[in-house]
C-alpha cells in the first residue's frame, strides 16, 4: 500500500469547499506510522530517529499551530488494533481541534508550517488524517 504523507490537491479542494460553507470547529484525527530512522531529502540530516524528527516537526510547527488556534486534545502511542488489518500498524495517534477548517487551511499554507512539514515527512513512513465534526 502506498504511504500517505501529504494532502492531495483533490482532497485540499474538498476541504476548501467544506470550509466555504462551514465555520464550526473540526477535530483532526492523526494516525501515524513512525520510521525507525528519519528519512530527509538531504541524507546528511538522517542522523536521528523518526521520533526525534517528529519532535522537530512538533517544535517547528508549535507557534503556527498556536496562532491558528489549534488545541491538542489528546495524543498517545498506539498499542493494539483489535479491529482492523493486522498488517497495518500505527505508532502514534493525536486528536487536534481547530476553530474551523478555514483555520487549518490557512495554517498549512504558511511558510513556517511548510518548513516544519519537512520534519514530519522525514519522521513518518505513513499517516492518515481524518477530519471530524461534532455530532449535531
Image (cartoon, helix red, strand yellow):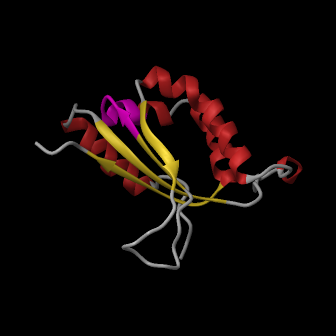
Please say whether residue 103 is one of the residues in the magenta stretch: yes
Q: Which residue lies furthest to the left in this view?
A: 136
Please say whether residue 131 is one of the residues in the magenta stretch: no
**Residue 40, percent across and down?**
76, 52
- Image: 4 above or below 86: above
* Quarter residue 36 falls in: bottom right
Which contiguous range is marked in magenta?
A: 96-105
- Image: 31 above or below 80: above
- Image: 73 above or below 5: above
Q: Residue furthest right?
A: 44
- Image: 97 above or below 36: above
Residue under the point 57% across and 34% down: 113
Residue under the point 49% across and 36% down: 108
Q: Can residue 84 be seen in this view?
A: yes
Q: In which quarter of the image is the C terminus?
A: top left
Residue under the point 28% across and 47% down: 132
How many numbered callouts?
A: 0
**Residue 29, percent across and down?**
39, 49
Between 101 and 27, the one lying in front of the other is 27
Residue under the point 27% across and 33% down: 25
Q: Is residue 111 visible?
A: no
Between 97 and 21, the one lying in front of the other is 97
**Residue 135, percent across and down?**
15, 45
In screen coordinates, is 76 left or right of 119? Answer: left
* Quarter residue 133 falls in: top left
In screen coordinates, is 18 left or right of 127? Answer: left
Amino acid at each position: 500500500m502506498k504511504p500517505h504523507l501529504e494532502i492531495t490537491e483533490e482532497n485540499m479542494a474538498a476541504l476548501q469547499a467544506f470550509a466555504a460553507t462551514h465555520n464550526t470547529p473540526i477535530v483532526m484525527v492523526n494516525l501515524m506510522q513512525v520510521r525507525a530512522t528519519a528519512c530527509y531529502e538531504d541524507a546528511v540530516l538522517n542522523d536521528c530517529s523518526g521520533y526525534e524528527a517528529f519532535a522537530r516537526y512538533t517544535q517547528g510547527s508549535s507557534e503556527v499551530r498556536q496562532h491558528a488556534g489549534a488545541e491538542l486534545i489528546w495524543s498517545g502511542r498506539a498499542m493494539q488494533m483489535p479491529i482492523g488489518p493486522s498488517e497495518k500498524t500505527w505508532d502514534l495517534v493525536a486528536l487536534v481541534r481547530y476553530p474551523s477548517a478555514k483555520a487549518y487551511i490557512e495554517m498549512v499554507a504558511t511558510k513556517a508550517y511548510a518548513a516544519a512539514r519537512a520534519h514530519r515527512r522525514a519522521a513518518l513512513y505513513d499517516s492518515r488524517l481524518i477530519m471530524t465534526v461534532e455530532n449535531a
